[in-house]
Amino acid sequence: MAMSDAAFTRERLPGAAAVHFRPVTIERRRVRVGLIVVSLVFLAVFLLLPVVAVFVEALRGGPKAFMDAIFEPDAAAAIRLTLLVAAIAVPCNLVFGLAASWAIAKFDFRGKSLLNTLIDLPFSVSPVISGLIYILMFGSHSLLGPILKSYGIQVIFAVPGIVLATIFVTFPFVARELIPLMEEQGQGDEEAALSLGASGWQVFFRVTLPNVKWALLYGVLLCNARAMGEFGAVSVVSGHIRGLTNTMPLHVEILYNEYNFAAAFAVASLLALLALFTLIVKSVLEWRYADEIAATRRH
Amino acid sequence: MARTNPSMARHIRRLLAALALGLATAIPPAFADVTLLNVSYDPTRELYKAYNEAFAAHWKAETGEAVTIQQSHGGSGKQARSVIDGIEADVVTLALQADIDAIVKESGKIAPDWRSKLPHNASPYTSTIVFLVRKGNPKGIKDWGDLVKDGVEVITPNPKTSGGARWNYLAAWAYANKAFGNDEAKIKEFVGNLYKHVPVLDTGARGSTTTFAQRGIGDVLLAWENEAFLAQEELGADKFDIVVPPLSILAEPPVAVVDANVDAKGTRKQAEAYLKYLYSKEGQQIAAKNFYRPTEPELVDAADLARFPKIELVTIDDPQFGGWAKVQPEHFGDGGIFDQIYKPTN
Amino acid sequence: MAALHIASIKRPSVIPGFGLALGVTLSYLGLIVLIPLAGLFWRSAQGGPAEFIRIATDARTLAALRLSFGTAFIAAAINAVFGMILAWILVRYDFPGRRIIDAIVDLPFALPTAVAGIALTALYAPNGWIGSLFEPFGIRIAYSATGIVIALVFIGLPFVVRSVQPVLEDFDREVEEVSATLGATRAQTVRRVVMPTLMPALLTGFALAFARAVGEYGSVIFIAGNSPYRTEIAPLLIVIKLEEFSYSGATTIAVLMLIASFLILLAINLVQSWSRRRYGDV
């Protein structure tokens, strides 16, 4: 009994196996097994089953129908557009995330907590509103829209609008990962490097960046996954022009509306694969570099 | 400082290149000599897929110019909103006149006399509203009155967002008008009662069809005639029956050139030809093959016409409605009759 | 000198780059977030206060807001309970597949919401894998408020787990031992000693899940019935108002939701700074 109790806990407490007591900081075995089972069932029903359903539905028509759906020209165009949008939105938010976390974590200034809240704001703004604000800014009835149009620049119902909406929705991802970590690490390393004669950029690239590289990578991965998968905001500004302004999630909806369920789920499964890939990369990095990550946190 | 940051400079360069690429792709790529954008409503996907190919071939043969037609589909109101907000549509092919009138009114991008520019009030094809029921019609639905029987669930989209749903609503109104002899209180009660039987109010006609056919919700789907035929064809004739009520409405989906956009892009000639060709023999035949009732039936093979049953059709210009200009604000406007009769069921 | 000190917004520091970093941050924040949002407020104010109040107090608007906030609250509460349990077993117990479970928790962050919506609808519709189990009892999950809650539980779960997990990892076990030595039962220790420390993190996770759920659109519209007054969420009502060409209606509801989300975020930050004062850094 005591043996199995200890085996269930993450750290074997010294001497726990020898003494016939359950360590006082561990629950009864019944409770533990109960909690684990409840959690697993909850995860299976709410998180795993939907993903399984996507793949089952995608492969229902057989592998050939699956491949046809993905290589069909409109689907290919949607995949290209999605990649392009992410390729612009993610680097923009990366630069912003670095600047914001440098300002917030390394300095003390008035209005800091307000700035912190404002950076989080896009997290809790409904995606629909994120799209709407750009319609109001760049639509035919706005101030800017007609001016830009006279120069031949179309923002909404074109790629720039989709990029803007995507940037808005994924705005806080990188900054959110970096700020707490950099606050925890403090300014000690940077001050030491400066006192040894390093320039500001040298400090940034040789000291700060290596210290936060894992958090930065997580931020970029999550930012990228969300950028590729955004639906609500993009749907409002896209105009749904086939082969031109449809991203992958919008293409899924279109196929779904054409009674082409197998194809809809095929494209959806690509997005689900992207999600799984993101999680696997994140986890593998976490396991492999666990010590290094822990070390940067302890700074 | 400039000495130490080659990688920063590289980063910025890459960023600018990406931005330039983004702007470049904003301008439609030149696949062909001319590109037209047709902004249409939901159920016309198959129709315009076939028609666009036919028109491109026809235009090439006639003028030697290659034309590519891009499509955008969605709820009729949403599509009109996109045009108002600046999508560069050359032509609009929407579900109802009120949506094109909204573009005229809100943006002025279409000249107000658009209905007189093409035959049949600018409707190259018409349709009507029929019932799609489960195989064998287990609830015995024959007419509009059967929809409000106990235990019958009706699937129809939201008239505020879907053009097709507005025709559904008006068809039910036309039935009630006849059944209750112009008694407005009773008509409202009937239509209100009908919407109490609706468990899922999708935003578009396609959403409703999916809810009914794929998700198995409801006993009867109020649908465009062409959608009902298509659903039967795509999703299995063994699963659904079409029930044609004795009376329904004549739905006239209109088309128009977006004047401001074609003049800015220099595509007026092609856009006008594109719409005009809908009235040709080939255009009418494609419409009929896609289950739309051609407005020039003499151009179409009798075999393709045989599938359209004869029903009594009330038009929108009938005195009880008085045309879209009156119906839209009165029934579907903010606080209009639909808002008044749509009461929550619990 | 004293005047100069007050005038400068920043406390002195040897680290360079404050101007550049803050400059980039503020201009980017301004261009992408603040100016467009200000445009929204400006547009909603154009109709005048009477119009704003009329739309804001319209029965249908209120029903949609009630539904959005109500279902988001229920979903966040469910997530608080199960997220707490999940964080607990992930930190405290060792069992086969623990690391995989840990990775799976982030799935809703990574999976596109529209894909989640379609998949959940396929599962919970009356003819779906799970929905068909409930249909014989007359229970309808998809196309009801229950369906909305399920979608919101899906998207909100990681917020709670990821908020609670680090705090629980840093929790000092000795405190629990002391509590046990003083005669507390395990349940008492968890309730009186562990939970109060976790509370701020749990509240933060709850609020984040809640804020995200209130505005969620992609995963909900597929599974909600979208009936006015009953299963029409506020973001959908914004879309519907837009499609009716009612910009004042759309912007009014958007402004109401924005103010609500800003207040929620502010509350989170207050909870965090309060708990930092009370318990030290979390």
Image (cartoon, rainbow, N blue to C red):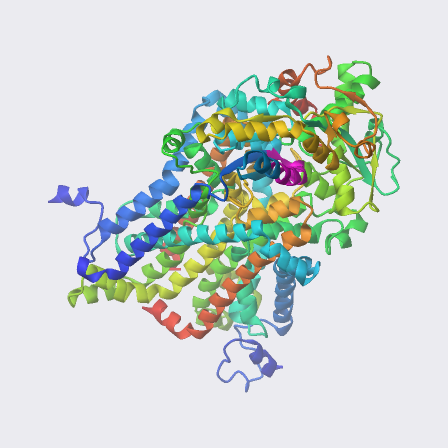
- State whether the magenta stretch is mostly helix, strand or loop: helix
Asked if residue C28 lies left or right of residue B85, the reply is left
Toward the viewer: C147 or A254? Answer: A254
Toward the viewer: A219 or B21? Answer: B21
Residue B158, percent from left and from top: 66, 32
Residue B290, percent from left and from top: 72, 37
Asked if residue C85 lies left or right of residue B212, the reply is left
Q: Magenta segment: does it hold B44?
A: yes
Looking at the image, can residue B253 be seen?
Answer: yes
Asked if residue C19 lies left or right of residue A128, the reply is left
**Over which residues does the magenta segment extend?**
B40-55
Looking at the image, can residue B159 be seen?
Answer: no
The quadrant of the rendering that contains the C terminus of chain B is: top right
Q: Magenta segment: does it hold A234?
A: no
Asked if residue A86 lies left or right of residue B51, the reply is left
Question: In the picture shown, does residue C243 fall above or below B313?
Answer: below
Residue pictured at 61% horizontal, 43% vertical: C221
